[in-house]
Amino acid sequence: MPTYLIEREIPGAGSLSDDQLKSISQTSCSVLKNMGPAIQWLQSYVTNDKIYCVYKAPSPEMILEHARLGGFPANLVSEVFTIIDPTTAD
């Protein structure tokens, strides 16, 4: 199943409280549960004004549907073709 990186523009994301992040996570998980097992949230990275999320899904359209149903922005959806890290240099 393809992996996608989603860029979500959320001004002040880095200042969100633990409770706010928990609420966002709960909303996402609830939407995912209703959408079924074809889409999976792996993790997210919170920066100053954006949240970058890693998902597995059969299509970018399913990612966009999750965003629509959850009320989240999905400003950019990019398919990940490979992952590299320091061990790639070995």
Image: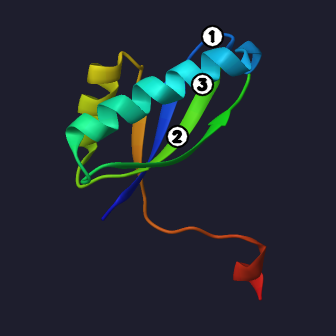
- Estimate the spatial distance between the alpha carbons at disc 3 and disc 2, rounded to whole Å: 15 Å
Q: Secondary structure at mark 1?
A: loop
Q: CA distance from mark 1 to mark 3?
A: 17 Å
Work out which quarter of the rendered image holds the N terminus and state it: bottom left
The answer to the question of whether label 1 and label 2 lie on touching residues, with beta carbons closer than 8 A, is: no
Residue 43 is left or right of residue 47, and the answer is left
Q: Residue under label 2, please give it.
A: 53
Q: Is residue 4 above or below residue 87?
A: above
What kind of residue is marked 3? Lys
Q: Earlier in the sequence, mark 1 or mark 3?
A: 1
Disc 1 marks a residue whose amino acid type is Pro
Whether residue 22 sits left or right of residue 77 in the image: it is right
Asked whether residue 75 appears in the rendered view, the answer is: no
Task: Work out whether mark 1 precedes mark 2 in sequence or the reverse, and give the earlier one.
Answer: 1
For marks 3 and 2, the one nearer the N-term is 3
- Residue 34: percent from left, percent from top: 23, 35
Can you say whether 60 is above or below 80 in the image?
above
Residue placed under numbered mark 1 in the picture: 11
According to the image, label 3 marks what residue? 22
Q: In screen coordinates, is 4 left or right of 69?
A: right
Q: Residue furthest bottom?
A: 90
90 over 79 or under it: above or below: below
The secondary structure type at the circle numbered 2 is strand
Observer-nearest residue: 30 or 1? 30
Percent coordinates x, y for residue 59 in the rendering: 23, 50
